[in-house]
């Protein structure tokens, strides 16, 4: 993973503006330094890790009126603390918490303490397929583990940075798509769509699928567990998936195998065995994993290579 360094605030303003949008950066520290490790996953999805001293970053009203695209940014705090302000609201960030903000509106990131350690995800707005109103309502608010799906989402972001070493283009595209999908799920959960008292069958189905994605590594994931978690009957869960032409078990199996197919090419970088990949995807028995993967993709996990895009 490439690491870019800045030894002063002016250089950092230029680097961060190049990777996100033009910004105004200031610091109270005359010895300010910063680093950024960017990973490009798709044309409209990237993730990076940032380490810095105390810094205030502003997307001023004048800058926000420029035509710099319509991306969404999400900051996940790993170390120290900070604040993200937009739309008259301020999200306070401690390790494990995140905040969303729109690049086409003014915002302020205020990180007054040293030892800043952040992950920043950039996603094109259209990639999320989430209503603008829902996005605006989530901006400037703290997204933490009380939000359904945040644990899986933040773990996924950390994992992408750790596994960057030898990822091919196809794998990067898959990882970027999944990151955007998980963020969309978190935003819907934050809006209250992930709770009991469902607005519609589609809302419930979205929540159930999100729950499945969060628990793919659990070999005990079952229809009974899904029904309990969402306060509905087992018959209701089957009916939801029947309307899509797929059984719950088939959906779980397909998602597990798709995740395995995305993780296998990165084994050289992560040091995982094939059995470990299978276990991480809900297949604790290597033989069962081998049979299921071969049936799905026409080759065993040991010889899997994704088709170039």
Image: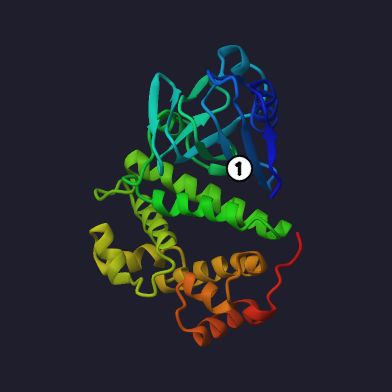
User: Residue under circle 1?
Assistant: 48
The picture places residue 270, in percent across and down from the top left corner, at 60, 65
Residue 9 quadrant: top right
Residue found farthest to the front:
31
| Nearer the observer, 241 or 253 | 253
Residue 13 appears in view: yes
Q: Please tell me how crowded label 1 is: few (under 14), some (14-19), or many (20+) other residues with Cα within 10 Å.
A: many
Write the residue at 46% across / 24% down.
Answer: 112
The colour scheme used here is: rainbow
Q: Is residue 298 visible?
A: no
Query: Dividing the image into 4 quarters, which one contains the C terminus?
Result: bottom right
Between 247 and 285, the residue placed more toward the observer is 285
Q: Residue at x 29, y 68 (%)?
A: 225
Question: In the figure, 242 relative to 193: above or below?
Answer: below
Residue 20 located left or right of residue 179: right
Where does the image place residue 156, in percent across and percent down from the top left?
A: 50, 54
Question: 170 above or below 157?
Answer: below
| Left or right position of 6 against 54 | right
Horizontal side, residue 232 vs residue 70: left or right: left
In x, y percent, where is residue 28? 53, 18
Q: Position of residue 25 (x, y in %)?
A: 59, 20
Q: Secondary structure at mark 1?
A: strand
Residue at 40 percent of width and 65 percent of height:
241
């Amino acid at each position: 993973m490439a690491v870019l360094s800045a030894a002063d605030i002016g250089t950092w303003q230029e680097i961060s503006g190049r990777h996100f949008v033009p910004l105004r950066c200031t610091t109270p520290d005359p010895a300010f330094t910063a680093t950024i490790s960017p990973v490009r996953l798709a044309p409209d999805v990237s993730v990076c890790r940032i380490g810095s001293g105390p810094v205030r970053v502003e997307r001023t009203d004048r800058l926000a009126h420029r035509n710099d695209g319509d991306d969404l940014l999400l900051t996940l705090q790993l170390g120290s603390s900070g604040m993200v302000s937009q739309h008259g609201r301020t999200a306070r960030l401690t390790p494990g918490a995140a905040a969303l903000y729109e690049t086409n509106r003014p915002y302020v990131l205020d990180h007054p303490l040293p030892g800043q350690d952040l992950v920043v995800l950039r996603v094109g707005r259209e990639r999320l397929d989430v209503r603008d109103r829902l996005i605006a309502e989530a901006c400037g608010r703290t997204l933490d583990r009380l939000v359904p799906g945040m644990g899986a989402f933040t773990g996924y972001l950390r994992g992408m940075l750790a596994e960057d070493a030898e990822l091919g283009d196809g794998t990067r595209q898959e990882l970027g798509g999944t990151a955007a999908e998980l963020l969309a799920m978190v935003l819907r959960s934050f809006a209250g769509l992930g709770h009991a008292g469902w607005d519609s069958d589609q809302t419930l189905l979205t929540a159930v699928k999100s729950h499945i994605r969060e628990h793919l590594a659990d070999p005990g994931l079952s229809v009974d567990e899904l029904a309990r978690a969402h306060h509905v009957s087992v018959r209701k869960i089957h009916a939801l998936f029947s309307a899509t032409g797929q059984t719950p078990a088939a959906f779980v199996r397909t998602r597990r195998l798709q995740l395995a197919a995305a993780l296998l090419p990165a084994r050289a970088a992560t040091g995982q065995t094939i059995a470990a990949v299978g276990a991480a995807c809900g297949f604790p028995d290597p033989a069962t994993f081998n049979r299921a993967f071969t049936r799905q993709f026409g080759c065993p996990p040991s010889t899997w290579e994704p088709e170039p895009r």
